[in-house]
Amino acid sequence: MQRQSLIIDCDPGVDDAVGLLLAFASPELDLLAVTTVAGNVSLERTTRNARILRQIAGREDVPVFAGAERPLRRDPADAGDFHGAEGLGGLETFEPDAPAAPEVAAHAIVEAVMSRPAGSVALAVMGPMTNLALALRAEPALAERLGPVVIMGGARSEGGNITASAEYNIWADPDAAAQVFASDCRITVLGLDATHQVRATADRIAAIQALPGFCARTAAALLRFSQDVERRIVGWDWAPLHDPCTIAWLLKPELFRAVPCRIEVETESDLTRGHTAVELRVDAASARHHWVAEADAQGVFDLIAERLERLP
Ligand code: BDR
Ligand code: CA
């Protein structure tokens, strides 16, 4: 099997956590690193949470690198309302056995990508894009050298989830996102238009809960927490499954329909900060960005269930 080398940049976060478990369980992925960023909760917590998830999945072979403590030029955001104060919903957190690696995330990304063949390392970004922006600043040749970049962020027809026009990850560090989209990176974007289709409903959560293993039960608990939060704060009976879609796209792109586009990010207006302008009138052959318009929700949940069953 030809394995895809992958770095996951994340801010766990309940949905990041399910995405990490999906990746840890997938033999097609050669996980080079998990890098963390401040986003849903502080950097200290997102890094600890990534280490907890790798430990419960039995994947201490994957190094975790801590990254940016704050966005490029904004105050740090916090989504504790949606992810719990510790970032993992109602789960009991603990200090994991293995520490984070000593290098900083942006440096680890540059090292991993520049030391391997061009186009061979994929990057999945599940949080604010601060680490990738810093890595691109440190090594401008990185954009050309990276393989597929898949990002959870942005919104077009769905409107925003943190403001009327912005999705949380882009809003949290719009300057980083603007820089990444203006770079030469080839990016597939799973925004709210796609992830709002992938709904963790009571039935789908029950199917995961019924699987054997601690990790599956953990994933079910995280999804149930999200469902409760959405019910209470937004009024939906289901939770959108955002970040795991990046890993599902890498594993089974046929579950998604993407269209070529050009994305720019609003950084100056207070009103529309972090808005993603998704221009579909582009030349398909030369487009560097692809916007995911449709997702096969049941296919994504079946994939997650099939993979979680392999974890302890
Ligand atoms: C994104 O924001 C975060 O709260 C989630 O983890 C996800 O990455 C959804 O807008
Ligand atoms: Ca996230």
Image (cartoon, rainbow, N blue to C red):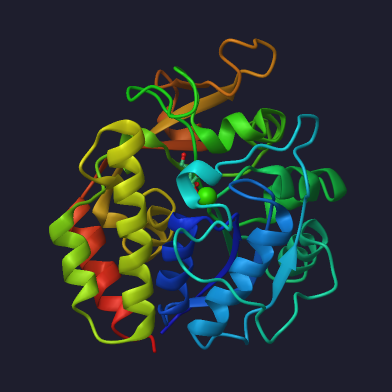
Residue 27 in percent (x, y) is at 42, 82
Residue at 39% in and 89% down = 312
In the picture, which quadrant includes the N terminus?
bottom left
267 sits to left or right of 102: left
Say how many tags the image has: 0
User: Would residue 187 be seen by someone viewing this image from the given angle?
Assistant: no
Q: Quadrant of residue 28?
A: bottom left
In this view, the residue in front, 257 or 71, is 71
Residue 225 in view, yes or no: yes
Q: Quadrant of residue 145?
A: bottom right
Q: Nearer the viewer, residue 185 or 216?
A: 216
| Residue at screen point 50% across, 42% down | 81
Q: Residue at x 17, y 56 (%)?
A: 202
Image position, residue 193 (x, y; %): 33, 33
Compared to residue 76, the image places residue 118 above or below, namely below
Q: Please determine whether, in this image, residue 29 is positioned above or below residue 223.
A: below
- For this orientation, the residue located farthest to the left is 203
Q: Residue at x 52, y 88 (%)?
A: 58
Instruction: State left or right for residue 161 relative to residue 264.
Output: left
| x, y percent for residue 142 | 74, 52
The image position of residue 298, as x and y in percent, is 17, 57
Which of these two is toward me, 158 or 70? Answer: 70
